[in-house]
Amino acid sequence: MTLIVHKLSMEYPYINIYGIGDKHIGSKECDIKRLKKQVSTILDDEYGYCVICGDLINNGLKNSKTNTYQEVIQPAMQKELMYEIYKPLADNGKILAGVPGNHCERTVKEAGTNPMYDVFCRWNIPHLYRENLALLKINLGSRKDGKRQISYAGLVTHGSSKNKHHKFVMGFDGIDFAISGHTHTPEYTPRGKIRIDLKNETAKKVGYKEIIVDSSLESGGYALKNEYEISAPPETQILKLYGTHKRMDYLSLDNNE
């Protein structure tokens, strides 16, 4: 539950946070070219950062739902590809936080090691990794006095079912955004709650954003066999945090080329 704190430049007018999760490297449905394109987009964005929501590899093991015979790359090489593809983001300080997913947990149960944690250590950013959820404090820009920065609080987790995840996020008072994955269905939902300020004896409505990241997977595999809901076409999701005043905007870019 220890916060990951980022104090970014006071000169930043804003930052763009890209959510990355559920890429399932190693599955037949994974499009490596699309993954690399997203990495290039973030690297080319001067104010671009990202959070990693888990399941970047498919990690099909003998006792998992995944049919191991349909994996196009063995798990060890999946981890190597994850390391290589996303290493430029780590090298350029673009990763704000990362958590593992349920496909990562397969190796934890079988062998006691977590491929996501291993890769974060190899990227030399283990302090940005959290085992269950990551709580973020992000400071950027400055207010009119030129001294105080704008502060945002965020939550990053792999996620679960839609209703269960929403109830979980509701338990964290004071967050401005929550970014997760797991469902493979990209989604943006503005939420609200009433915050009681005992010091000033006021009650006011405050908002926060819930974002579920895109998986960018093609249709196929056990998702079709078990009649899972067809996911939306691939897209790149961006949460813009402003450094001049407290405001968040959501933007979705077509990533179907």
Image (tube, rainbow, N blue to C red):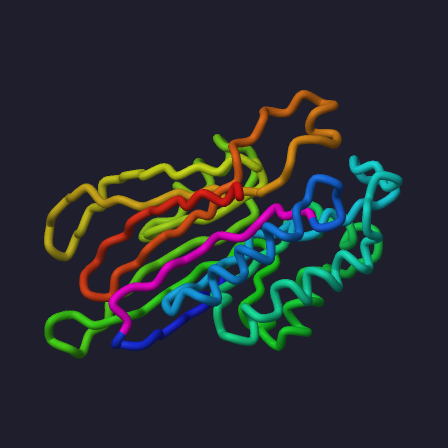
Residue closest to the far front: 257
The x and y percentages for residue 239 are 36, 52
The x and y percentages for residue 158 are 56, 47
Q: Which residues are magenta?
A: 12-24
The x and y percentages for residue 97 are 51, 63
Taking the spot 76% from the left edge, 56% from the top edge, the residue there is 78
Image: 233 above or below 197? above
In the picture, measured across the screen, residue 29 lies left or right of residue 161, that is: right
Taking the spot 56% from the left edge, 76% from the top edge, the residue there is 91
How many marks the image carries: the answer is 0
The x and y percentages for residue 216 are 58, 42
Taking the spot 36% from the left edge, 37% from the top edge, the residue there is 189
Image: 183 above or below 45? above
Q: Is residue 199 magenta?
A: no
Taking the spot 41% from the left edge, 58% from the top edge, the residue there is 17
Residue 67's quadrant in the figure?
top right
Residue 182's quadrant in the figure?
top right
